[in-house]
Amino acid sequence: MIWQKVDSALASALEDTQDMNASQFDVLIQTFKNPGPSEREYLDKLGVPRNSQGPIFTARVSAKDIHALSDESWVRAVRLARKLQVAV
């Protein structure tokens, strides 16, 4: 696990995780460039939608997947997604 690639909110959530496979997190995955075929295959296995373009993707992944993603050289960052509030 490369902790420098994970934001503080996600790091905190991961520290509180009991089951690495059962816990699911909504995350933003940022890559250094648009993924090539092997990277796209990896993202497909995680359930990242194909309609995601560019170097930023959203996904719901397990803590175990986050650990694996952070170790990939083509991944720049993994951040905990936040729910947007409607401004009134």
Image: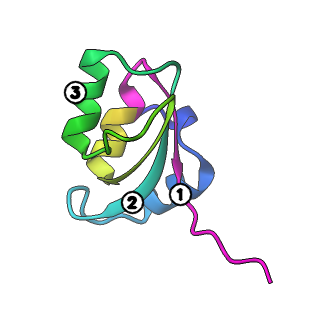
The answer to whether 3 is drawn above or below residue 74 in the figure is: below
Residue position marked by numbered label 3 in the rendering: 41
Q: Secondary structure at mark 1?
A: loop
Residue 14's quadrant in the figure?
bottom left
Residue position marked by numbered label 1 in the rendering: 81
Q: What residue is at 69 percent from the left and 77 percent from the top? A: 86
Q: Work out how far the residue at label 2 is from the one at label 3, CA to CA, in angstroms.
A: 20 Å
Q: Earlier along the polypeptide chain: callout 1 or callout 2?
A: 2
Residue 40 in the image, given as x and y percentages of width and height: 29, 26
Q: Earlier along the polypeptide chain: callout 1 or callout 3?
A: 3
Residue 50's quadrant in the figure?
top left
* Residue sitting at the far right: 88
Q: Work out how far the residue at label 1 is from the one at label 2, CA to CA, in angstroms.
A: 8 Å
Whether the magenta-drawn stretch holds residue 86 is answered as: yes
Tag 1 and tag 3, C-beta contact below 8 Å: no
Q: What residue is at 39 percent from the left and 60 percent from the top? A: 25
